Amino acid sequence: MREYQSGGDGAGNATFGPGLVFEGKLSFQGQVRFDGTFTGEITTDDLLIIGETAKVSADITCGSVVINGEVNGKIKARDSVELRGHARVKADLVTPSLVMDKGVVFDGYCNMMDKRDIVSLPSANGDERRKSWQSGGRGNKHQDRRNREAIEAQPADLSAQ
C-alpha cells in the first residue's frame, strides 16, 4: 500500500474539502486531495488524490492518481492509477501501472503502456483505440501479405517428422 505525504511544512500540499464546487482548469505541483465537486481539466506532474465524497468530471493529466470517489472523463498518468475502495470510474485510462481494489466500478478503456512510450488518450470517436500490437513496428499491410504469400508458397519440409 502506498504511503502518502501529510503534515510537514505543507509546501505543495492542499486539500479541497467536500463543500467546494469548482469549474475550470486546475494546475498544481505537489500532492493535492480533492473531496469536492470539480468539472474541467486537471494537470500536474505529482500526486492527485480523489476522495470518497468527490465527484470529478475532468480530463486529468498527472504523475499518479488515487481515486476513492467518482470520476468521469479521461485520465493520463505517467506513473500509476489506483482505483481504491468503492471508487466509481467512467473514464478512459492511459498508464503504465493500474491497481484496482475489489468493489471498484470501472467502465472505460485502459491502455497500459511503458513509461517510455509516448501515448495519446483515446479520442471520443475511438479513432486512436488501437492495441499496442496493431501500431508501430510492422510494415505496411501489402508487405505483410507478400511475406505471408511467400511463406505459404514454399514447399513444406516433412523430413523432420
Image: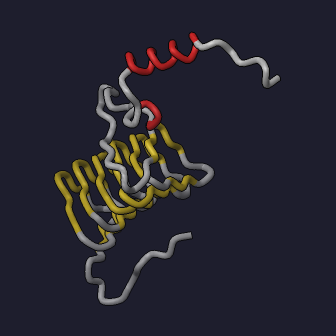
Task: Please tell me which residue is depicted at 50% across the width and 53% down the height of the picture.
Answer: 98
Q: Say if 140 sits above or below 121 in the image.
A: above
Residue 115 position in % (x across, y down): 39, 56
Query: 23 or 110, which lies in front?
Result: 110
Q: Quarter of the image holding residue 81?
A: bottom left
Across the whole image, how many numbered discs are drawn on residues?
0
- Residue 72 in view, yes or no: yes
Residue 39 position in % (x across, y down): 25, 48
Given the current orientation, which residue lies at the most extreme front position? Answer: 159
Task: Please tell me which residue is depicted at 44% across the width and 15% down the height of the picture.
Answer: 146
Given the current orientation, which residue lies at the most extreme bottom position? Answer: 9
Task: Please tell me which residue is depicted at 22% across the width and 67% down the height of the picture.
Answer: 28
Residue 54 position in % (x across, y down): 38, 56
Query: 41 or 143, which lies in front?
Result: 143
Q: Say if 10 sits above or below 105 in the image.
A: below
In which quadrant will I find the N terminus? bottom right
Query: 117 or 101, which lies in front?
Result: 117
Q: Quarter of the image holding residue 124?
A: top left
In which quadrant will I find the C terminus? top right
Residue 14 placement, left or right of 93: left
